[in-house]
Image (spheres, rainbow, N blue to C red):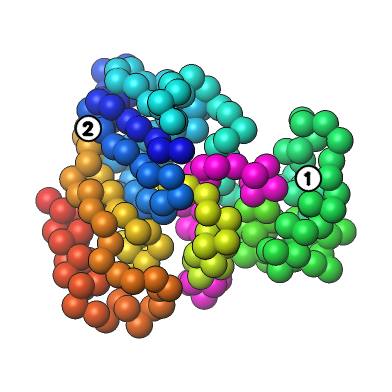
């Protein structure tokens, strides 16, 4: 299910947020999109999700134009967005309520995959930040999406929890095989997670770097000391500082 963007632009009044973005995202790949605040990263994600429409150009999945949201695409935002009056189990099941009878065995299996077994009856305020984000991820994945769109999902977590969630996401991606588009403003996160990296510049939002990440999998943080990693990081920092 390749995602294709062809000369995509998005204007807000007289402000051009995205300018002539062309991109092909291969099925099952992990694309990280890096850039400073205001460069159009989230706008790009919203267009792929079908939550917004381009001012010019077109987007498609498998050649079919994206005209709105679809069950093949699910978004995970920076804030977990869990309903405080629902239990963890009911929060995970929430999206399936729109599709008919809920397969509770499937819900419970996903809770187990996320390492949340034993917390099914807890409310969000009784969970740590990392557990809340895993619950939000479970709610997305139980929909069985082909494309997982993640908008800085770990930005609000402390450093240790963030590293654990990054490792957890990579292990999960290896199992589910979904296409992931991951938005971040953290250089190390972008390099460590993705197998391809897009760096955006602002005013107007445009692609400055688009390249494969020259690191083998599985990834580990010792790689951040390797020459290929440091060379790529220096190039990215130079582009972001320009």
Q: Judge the density around disc 2: few (<14), some (14-19), many (≥20) Cα neighbours within 10 Å.
A: some
Between 91 and 173, which is closer to the camera in this rendering? Answer: 173
Q: Where residue 194 sits in the image (x, y, percent)?
A: 37, 59
Residues packed near mark 1 inside 10 Å, few (<14), some (14 to 19) or many (20 plus)? many
Q: For the residues marked 2 and 1, what is the alpha-carbon distance in whole angstroms?
A: 39 Å
Sequence-first tag of 2 and 1: 1
Left or right placement of residue 7 versus residue 138 in this view: left
Foreground tag (2 vs 1): 1
Residue at left 63%, top 53%?
Answer: 137
Is residue 86 among what the camera can see?
no
The reply to whether discs 2 and 1 touch (Cβ–Cβ < 8 Å) is: no
Is residue 141 a member of the stretch shown in magenta? yes
Does 166 appear in magenta? no
Q: Which mark is residue 62?
A: none
Q: Which residue does the numbered mark 1 point to in the structure image?
A: 93
Query: 69 or 103: nearer the eye?
Result: 103
Residue 204: which disc?
2
Residue 77 in the image: above or below residue 176: above
Mark 2 secondary-structure assignment: loop
Read off the magenta span. 139-165
Q: Secondary structure at mark 1?
A: helix
Q: Is residue 63 left or right of residue 112?
A: left
């Amino acid at each position: 299910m390749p995602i294709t963007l062809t000369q995509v632009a998005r204007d807000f009044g007289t402000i051009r947020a995205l300018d002539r973005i062309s991109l092909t995202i291969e099925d099952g790949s992990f694309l990280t999109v890096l850039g400073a605040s205001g460069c159009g990263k989230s706008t790009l994600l919203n267009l792929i999700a079908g939550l917004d429409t381009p001012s010019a150009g077109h987007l498609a999945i498998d050649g079919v134009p994206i005209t709105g949201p679809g069950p093949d695409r699910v978004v995970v935002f920076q804030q977990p967005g869990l309903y405080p009056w629902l239990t963890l189990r009911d929060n995970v099941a929430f999206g399936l309520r729109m599709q008919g009878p809920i397969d509770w065995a499937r819900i419970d299996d996903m809770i187990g995959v996320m390492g949340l077994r034993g917390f099914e009856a807890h409310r969000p305020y009784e969970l740590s930040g990392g557990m809340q984000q895993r619950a939000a991820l479970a709610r997305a994945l139980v929909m069985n999406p082909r494309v997982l769109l993640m908008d800085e999902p770990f930005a609000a977590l402390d450093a240790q929890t963030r590293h654990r969630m990054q490792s957890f996401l990579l292990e999960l991606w290896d199992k589910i095989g979904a296409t992931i588009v991951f938005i971040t403003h953290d250089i190390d996160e972008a390099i460590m997670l993705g197998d391809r990296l897009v760096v955006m510049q602002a005013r107007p939002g445009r692609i400055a770097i688009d390249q494969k990440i020259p690191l083998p999998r599985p990834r580990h943080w010792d790689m951040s000391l390797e020459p290929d990693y440091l060379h790529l990081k220096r190039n990215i920092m130079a582009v972001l500082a320009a």
